[in-house]
Image: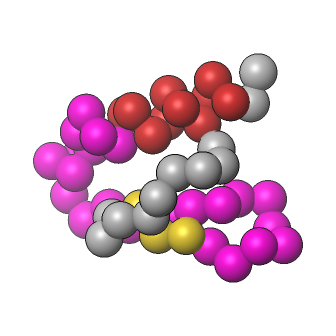
Amino acid sequence: MKGIDPTDRLLAIPPGGMCNYKVRLSTEKEVDAELMGWFRTAFDSAK
C-alpha cells in the first residue's frame, strides 16, 4: 500500500523494509471500518 497519507493511527515506517505503515492497536474497538479499509487497500494493491 503506497500513497496513503499517514495519520495519528496509521504511522509511516521509514523506507527500506517490507512494510510502509504500522498501526498500533490497544483494544478490540480499534478494529473498525477505517482499519479494515486500510487492509482492503493494501490487499487490493498487492494483486
Extreme residue in the bottom direction: 14
- Residue 35 visible? The answer is yes
Residue 14 drawn in magenta: yes
Q: Nearer the viewer, residue 38 or 32?
A: 38
Task: Say left or right for 13 vs 35.
Answer: right
What segment carries the magenta color?
13-35
Q: Quadrant of residue 33?
A: top left
Which image quarter holds the N terminus? top right
Residue 38: image location, x then y, percent? 45, 40
Q: How is the image coloured?
A: secondary structure
* Residue lying at 62% horizontally and 29% vertically, measured from the top left: 43
Task: Say left or right for 44 vs 7.
Answer: right
Count of marks placed on residues: 0
* Residue lying at 60% horizontally and 50% vertically, measured from the top left: 3
Instruction: Tell me: residue 9, above or below residue 14.
Output: above
Q: Quadrant of residue 21?
A: bottom right
Residue 5: image location, x then y, percent? 47, 59
* Residue lying at 60% horizontally and 36% vertically, measured from the top left: 42
Q: Nearer the viewer, residue 40 or 25?
A: 40
Instruction: Tell me: residue 45, above or below residue 17.
Output: above
Magenta part mainly helix, strand or loop?
loop
Which image quarter holds the C terminus? top right
Q: Nearer the viewer, residue 42 or 4?
A: 4
Residue 20: image location, x then y, percent? 66, 61
Task: Say left or right for 3 vs 6.
Answer: right
Residue 46: image location, x then y, percent? 74, 30
- Residue 23 visible? The answer is no
* Residue lying at 37% horizontally and 34% vertically, measured from the top left: 36
Q: Nearer the viewer, residue 23 or 26?
A: 23
Instruction: Tell me: residue 33, above or below residue 20.
Output: above
Extreme residue in the right direction: 16
